[in-house]
Amino acid sequence: MSLVPQSVRERYGFEHAMFTPITAGHLNQTLRVDVDGARFILQCLNTIFGAEIHEDIYAVTEHLTRAGLITPRLFRTRDGELFVRDERVYRVFTFVEGATHLKSTSPVLCQSAAALLGQFHTALLDLQHVFVNKRGNIHGPQRHADHLRRTLEKYVAHEHFSEVSPIADEILAGIAALPPFESLPTRVVHGDPKISNVLFGARDEALCLVDLDTLYPSNIAFELGDAFRSWCNPFEEDDASSHIDLAYFEAGVGGYAAGAGSFVTREEAHAITLGVEAIALELAARFTADALEESYFGWDTKRFKRSAEHNLARGKGQLAIARSVQTRRDTLQGIVESAFAETIKSRNFGPATATS
């Protein structure tokens, strides 16, 4: 059976193309397309996303292009559409040559990725677009904590419940102790800036962000929290040894401050450290819930017998990151204060216990 429906091939002019599966990402099915000397990326969109997100992707990527940033761009069909619907939704992106990493390998990698993210946020400050993404902002630690509680109540009979329950209790306690983040300014963010969503060049220079289905207005505490919990962890996300490496964090925060320039407010900078803890706990909650539900995240069939086992390992890995932030919060906050001292005139950050 063909990897790509005939109707999709015809709409894009890919009747004679070669399709090569790319095994990356938890959600979308991705193929490399080689046709007539050109290369593209074709994806079958996960059903959790509505086709309307392509309006957001188009608006953002065209704006980034005008700002001079590298970005994959939607490749239209022969009749000018942004996607094709054939039972599932298919879309094609222009191909950007580069490599991805499943984990950080050096502080230089963190610094480069963070500088790119700062440039990304800066370029989108003047974007005039009403987002149509119906999923909205995926981040919200309290919301994911509520879902985890409901999942624990529903799946008491699950064979992995006894392993999940104590992990979940610690996650829920950590989320309950977090301050609110609602007072922070709203920025257009990537929404999922983990290290594997950054494309790097041959010299480990960050080229662009990929996997753009989560674009949405949010706050940079959650955005940077998601970035740094990924970039500053020298292990893969499902490794129990995961933690925030201080050298990686210093490089990442410094890179972001340099790339973002002067738009970051005192309140936003103040919230970065707590943002890392919040997103690590949130993701731990999501993975732990799916260890019982086994319905959302993809999983590594070569390393684990079932999705429950992989998601539990992921949950433990993210909880380990949150613990590492909790035990070194003041040190991490001092790094943030130093990095933003030039762009934010006041250095009176105070302890990292509130967002304003």
Image (cartoon, rainbow, N blue to C red):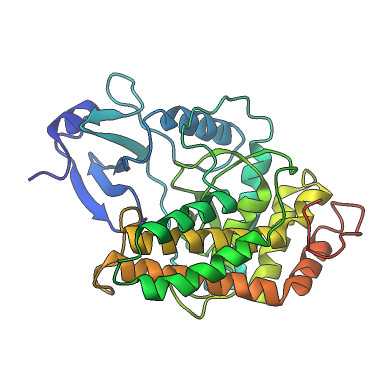
> Of 178 and 350, which appears nearest the observer?
178
Q: Nearer the viewer, residue 49 or 2?
A: 49
Q: Tell me how many marks there are.
A: 0
Q: Is residue 138 visible?
A: yes
User: Going 34% across and 69% down the picture, which residue do you hit?
Assistant: 310
Query: Where is residue 95, by image quadrant?
Result: top left
Percent x, y of residue 7:
16, 29
Which residue occupies the extreme bottom position in the image?
Answer: 241
Residue located at (32% from left, 47% from top): 28
Q: Nearer the viewer, residue 2 or 214?
A: 214
Q: Horizontal and vertical percent for residue 352?
A: 78, 63
Q: Is residue 90 left or right of residue 3?
A: right
Q: Where is the N terminus found, in terms of image quarters?
A: top left
Question: Does residue 236 appear in the picture of this structure?
Answer: no
Give residue 326's quadrant in the image.
bottom right
Image point (27%, 28%), residue name: 84
Q: Is residue 316 left or right of residue 264?
A: left
